[in-house]
Image (cartoon, rainbow, N blue to C red):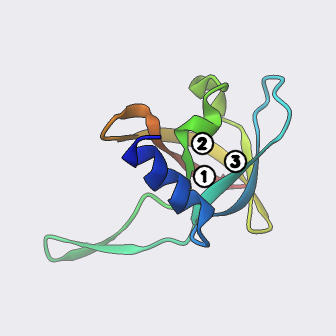
Amino acid sequence: MNIWAAHYAALYASPIAVNAVLTVACGHPPMALRAIDKTASKTISFQGADVLDIGPAAMVRAVDLADVDLADLRGASLEINGKTWTVRNHVLKPAPTGEAAGEILLMLSAR
């Protein structure tokens, strides 16, 4: 295991990540995984003005979605912390060793 795989394994095993269930419509059974809840909007200071971030989101490990076609994520549902969200888009957040070893930011909307 390389240092980045160990880093992400420890991060997602820690209390910062929570249990979640991702359901993709394309014939995959619901997948239990760990996710970092980023559903609370945050204000970011940018050049003297306060702006809201992208809105509700969740981070998941790319290795947990290795068997999923990323195009199928749009419209999937993510159950996290007792609420079900719809995945409206995603962004890859690669590790220094590449996309497959990093994270995927799931951009969510309320059901």
Answer with mark 1 or mark 3, whichever residue precedes in sequence. 3
The percent coordinates of residue 69 (x first, y second) are 62, 22
Task: Tell me the residue that label 1 is attached to.
Answer: 108
Q: Is residue 103 left or right of residue 79?
A: left
Note whether 44 is above or below 73 in the view shown: below
Q: Amino acid at mark 1?
A: Leu
- Secondary structure category for the residue under label 3: strand
Answer with mark 2 or mark 1, whichever residue precedes in sequence. 2
The percent coordinates of residue 16 (x first, y second) are 57, 70
Q: Are marks 2 and 3 in contact (CB under 8 Å)?
A: yes
Note whether 81 is above or below 57 in the view shown: below
Task: Tell me the residue that label 3 is attached to.
Answer: 86
Residue at image x 33%, y 35%?
97
- Secondary structure category for the residue under label 2: strand
Q: Are marks 2 and 1 in contact (CB under 8 Å)?
A: yes
User: Where is residue 93, by image quadrant?
Assistant: top left
Note whether 26 is above or below 7 in the view shown: above
Task: Tell me the residue that label 2 is attached to.
Answer: 88
The percent coordinates of residue 101 (x first, y second) are 45, 37
